[in-house]
Image (cartoon, helix red, strand yellow):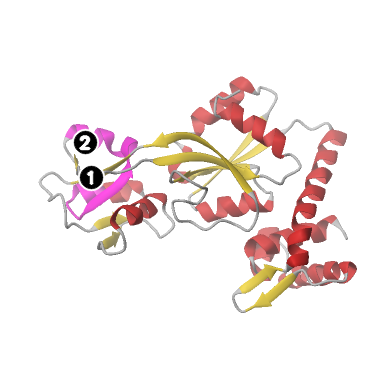
Amino acid sequence: MELGQLRTFEAVVVHRTVAGAAIALGLAPASVAGQLRTLEGSLGTALFERSPRGMTPTRAGHRLLPWARRLLDQAEQARREVADVRPVLRLGALGAVAVTHAPAVLARLAERRPGLDVALHTDPARDRLLHGVAAGSLDAALLLDAPGPLGALGFALPPVQLAHLDLEDVPLALVAAPGSPSSGQRLLVNGPGCSFRLAGDRLFGPGAERLHTGDIAATRACAERGLGMALLPESAVRAHLTAGALHPLGSPAVPPLRLRLIWRADHASAHAVHEALHAAAGLC
């Protein structure tokens, strides 16, 4: 049982296919499949159930998963200590909050953990951030969710144990062009995985007409042109409301989203990550 085989095993758990794991690891699919066969042969048991819908861990695979992460973490910790490398927190941030919220988190970390280096990775896709945390390429990620359990906004979670820390509420505003009716309009949205689209789905249900307009800036511009109503971060439309280019729609009431830091709870370094993230939140 080799570290490379464990890394490959974990990638297949996260991505659910040999092809997806191969892309994530930068390997040929045949190499990924071969490493899995070798690992299963050395353990004398099947680690995955294979079906047209993808690969899911067997009971043996589920038992191996925390061991794989623990061994990989310990190997990385040994490498850093032997090489006397400064600790690095690999932090992912959803593109929608990278500019508005990540700088404050980084500033708190710089103040409270001056010996810690932070590598920030931004991505517009929540799924890629979640997979990065699950696969261990990211230590933690900064994203938006609804109050409640992790994933309450309606997005799927990877098949690993994740922990989270709530930082602050992110107010939303439902806006439209001046003179637009307060109801019966179509909702201007981004792609299916967008946090603000998911918030709109929770607010209006499946019946509201939707028009795909793109990112925050494009959706806001389309709302100004009277193409529909937009549910966006209040910070992104504050100046436009003040200038009269948009006006708020008072009904229905819009609950805020929640800014969350998430990390993989079963990492060997989870305690150190947890301490660093509490420092990022200003809690220690």
The residue identified by callout 1 is: 175
Residue at (51%, 40%) from the top-left corner?
Answer: 260
Secondary structure category for the residue under label 2 = helix
Q: Residues within 10 Å of mark 1 (few under 14, many from 20)?
A: many
> Callout 1, which amino acid?
Val
**Residue 268 relative to residue 232: left or right:** right
The quarter in which the C terminus is drawn is top right
Residue at (36%, 40%) from the top-left corner?
Answer: 256
**Residue 243 relative to residue 213: left or right:** left
Q: Are the residues flagged by discs 1 and 2 in contact, CB closer than 8 Å?
A: yes
Where is residue 192? Give x, y as percent. Answer: 41, 60
Where is residue 12? Give x, y as percent. Answer: 69, 64
**Residue 229 relative to residue 200: left or right:** left
The residue identified by callout 2 is: 241
Q: Give the range drawn in magenta.
A: 221-243
Residue at (78%, 59%) from the top-left corner?
Answer: 64
| Observer able to see residue 208 | yes
Where is residue 186? Give x, y as percent. Answer: 22, 58
* Direction bottom: furthest residue: 52
Where is residue 115? Give x, y as percent. Answer: 70, 24
Residue at mark 1 to residue at mark 2: CA–CA distance:
8 Å
> Callout 2, which amino acid?
Leu
Residue at (85%, 40%) from the top-left corner?
Answer: 78
Q: Is residue 56 magenta?
A: no
Q: In which quarter of the image is residue 109?
A: top right
Circle nearer the N terminus (1, 2): 1
The quarter in which the N terminus is drawn is bottom right
Q: Main secondary structure of the magenta part?
A: helix
What is the tally of numbered marks visible in this picture? 2
Residue nearest the viewer, comparing 44 with 5 = 44
> Does 44 sit above or below residue 164?
below
> Does 275 sit above or below residue 36?
above
